[in-house]
Image (cartoon, rainbow, N blue to C red):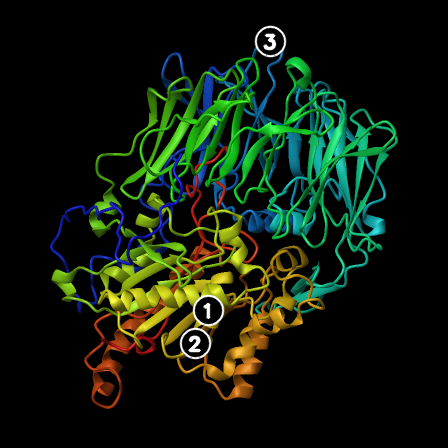
Amino acid sequence: MQAPVAAEDDEKVFAKKPRHCEAEMPLADANNESSFFPVEEIVQYPLPGYVVPSSITFSPDDRLISYLFSPDGTLYRKVFAFDIASRRQDLVFSPPDGGGLDESNLSEEEKLRRERSRERGLGVTRYEWKARSLSGKHTIMVPLPAGIYLQEICDTEPELKLPCCSSSPIIDPHLSPDGSMLAYVREDELHVLSLLDGQPKQLTFGAKENGMTHGLAEYIAQEEMERKNGFWWSPDSKYIAFAEVDSSEIPLFRIMHEGKKSVGSDAQEDHAYPFAGASNVKVRLGVVAASGGEVTWMDLICGVQDEAGGAEEYLARVNWMPDNSLVSQVLNRSHTKLKILKFDIQTGKKIVLFVEEQGTWINLHDCLTPLDKGVNSLSGGFIWASEKTGFRHLYLHDKNGVCLGAITQGNWMVEQIAGVNENAGLLFFTGTMDGPLESNLYCTSLFPDWNHPLQLPRRLTHGSGRHAVILDHQMQRFVDVYDSLNSPPRVILCSLHDGSIITPLYEQPLSIPRFRKLQLLSPEIVQISAKDGTVLYGTLYKPDASKFGPPPYKTLINVYGGPSVQLVVDSWINTVDMRAQYLRNKGILVWKLDNRGTARRGLKFEGHLKHNFGHVDAEDQVTGAEWLVRQGLAKVGHIGLYGWSYGGFLSAMSLARFPDTFCCAVSGAPVTSWDGYDTFYTEKYMGLPKENPDAYEYGSIMHHVHKIKGKLLLIHGMIDENVHFRHTARLINSLIAAGKPYELLLFPDERHMPRQLRDRIYMEMIGANHQARSRRQASIVAGRSNVSKPARAHGFVILRCCQRGPRGGVTSKPAPLSIPAATPQPRVTIHLLASFVPGV
């Protein structure tokens, strides 16, 4: 176990040295417009080194390992399977007739679900294994726009089991645990399809006419709670629990499609959007038999205003226990109390198993794991994760909810439970015991002797960096997806006993063509200190001194800075940050800093942002800029920022609060005033507007507009249903009132993250044209401005889109069955005139 090490001085640099691939062609001149790094490379996906398997899982009998893969290196993925015994890989499923080539035939609901899950993949985007039948055949279920397919793992043709169309889509289909049925939502109602006789059956009724949905997760759950599901199969496949969502009391927020030719209903959309301080949707939890019949409603209604002040505001999680009882996690409105409730599904009656309370806030997780082997007195017990020590750790509870003791401890955090072997008394989890910039797999005792100090967990993964793991059902092997700053992702089958390699599943080619061609350079990770001495981590992309001369350089800070996100990690995704690499190639130094309040550093570190948006986050970004200046890498007055979503907010806020440090900012889809964002995210960190008016006022960019001296570029999609365009419009009103200039780039047909390749390429080309003009203008005005010589660096930037709410960058918790960042990360290209950042 390793505790965080305090910085000895501001100049400490970790041993992550640049890795440089020799170019196949000589370096282009820095001022040559035809540089070997064309702007089009920024929008090419997958990123270099990320043509790798994703959505990896074991077959029910553990004989096969399945995954999504694109043999031609595009976003279009198919299902493959690897036979462990024969070491043979086979194509299992390819969308018939080229299905899923684009998003044009998706329903509006499915498009929005893809938007909220940040899904950009084409072809097959998800699949499920069907439980083995008596015939012993391996079968998978694959949902596509044309319908639900079943595919046996042999040479047979796929079977279209349930057709659908965009006017009547099938939403969120899931197989029953026994493989006999398929549950799905259609026209806001829950249905099942018998896979034995092919007969569909509607289970719920009356939703649409009453302004409700049955079996769908509400917007807040999908966008902010990381709960995508609205129904849950029981372990015995006899029942389905589901959420009834009533949004009838939420005022509709209308978004106009200003870029459309048409007017009227075809050019507008309405959303039940819960603004901070206003009402949330009402959610009930029901249980219905898979064969049909009356619904049994649990004794719970979330979102009802009561004297307890929203004690049961959010249905956060739902879990079935081995005895067919139902457990739900219910969060209060202030995010300080989480009830774990247990229901009798026959009567709906509940008991409170236990209550988790936290003065800072409750971070939701998926670590609740039932114990079902009947080990000693723990039959019906479960594993729970809590941050009561300041770091997320695992605890053992009995069937009555009583905490028996800790399983892990220390100044580091558990990320996920990877697997449990009750018979052997072993628990496998991923966490940060070896440092907050890494993620590794560990093994520890499930039933420790609390009369003695806890033993240190045993690490099973090898190599510093990031490991995402998938365990088999028999707890004998695991798939390790490993990457680091100096190593692109590789996929390895390992022994769960000691972590030794059994066989590689996917190895990168010795030379990645795009990486070699573009001469990408791994960034350096550095450690600095905040004003209060807290250790902060930053990432440096330095220009080539032999090409651009010694520092200081023009500097751009890629900022995010909000909760739940960590940008600075020992991961290949930072090495192939193509925007940062492009700017470095043009002589611009790029810097990233995870300020206090960002993810994976413990609750105390995160809690600096409580009621404090725009305070400590901006101040830490200044600390980072000052460190760059002290190292001689940057120069005051020649430093700009760029960011998206929360990063867009923080870039504009930093420009306004510290006008003598930052000369420009690019603010993409910014939350400009937190009273205009949603209830869950905003109130978790800022409280209610009426209870903390000063925090909301200070956290609004408009409160600081009058101090802006530098140049500001605003970018926004006009049909953004997450951070509405009204945020930018309100800021523009304040800029006008204060007499402050600004530039504006709008996308009439884009949402929170521009998705169309055409748009991204167009924006890159616009940026390239601005580069040439900016250099010519800089030469002309050099004698009468603060540009001391012709600008040698190009001044347009790309913004990295967010993954959560107004969040962005690398998520704090990788998906358990997918490769972190292997799904292409959305990006938005924008231009920033070179005169924004004066030459140095």
Q: Position of residue 232 (x, y in %)?
A: 70, 32
Tell me the number on the disc at residue 712.
Answer: 2
Three-letter amino acid code of the residue under disc 1: Ser
For this orientation, the residue located farthest to the front is 451
Work out how far the residue at label 2 is from the one at label 1, CA to CA, in angstroms. Answer: 7 Å
Say above or below: 532 vs 122. below
- Residue 832 in which image quadrant: bottom left
Q: Earlier in the sequence, mark 3 or mark 2?
A: 3
Q: Earlier in the sequence, mark 1 or mark 3?
A: 3
Three-letter amino acid code of the residue under disc 2: Leu
Q: Quadrant of the N terminus?
A: top left
- Helix, strand or loop under label 3: loop
Three-letter amino acid code of the residue under disc 3: Ser
Say above or below: 160 vs 718. above
Viewer-nearest of discs 3 and 2: 2
- What residue is pinned by disc 1? 667
- What residue is pinned by disc 3? 135
Say above or below: 784 vs 74. below
Q: Position of residue 791 (x, y in %)?
A: 23, 76
- Residue 751 in which image quadrant: bottom right
Does residue 486 appear to the left or right of 53 in the view shown? left
Task: Please tell me how crowded label 2 is: few (under 14), some (14-19), or many (20+) other residues with Cα within 10 Å.
Answer: many
- Residue 380 in which image quadrant: top right
Q: Earlier in the sequence, mark 2 or mark 1?
A: 1
Q: Position of residue 258 (x, y in %)?
A: 60, 70
Say above or below: 343 vs 770. above
Does residue 450 appear to the left or right of 788 in the view shown? right
Q: Quadrant of the C terminus?
A: bottom left
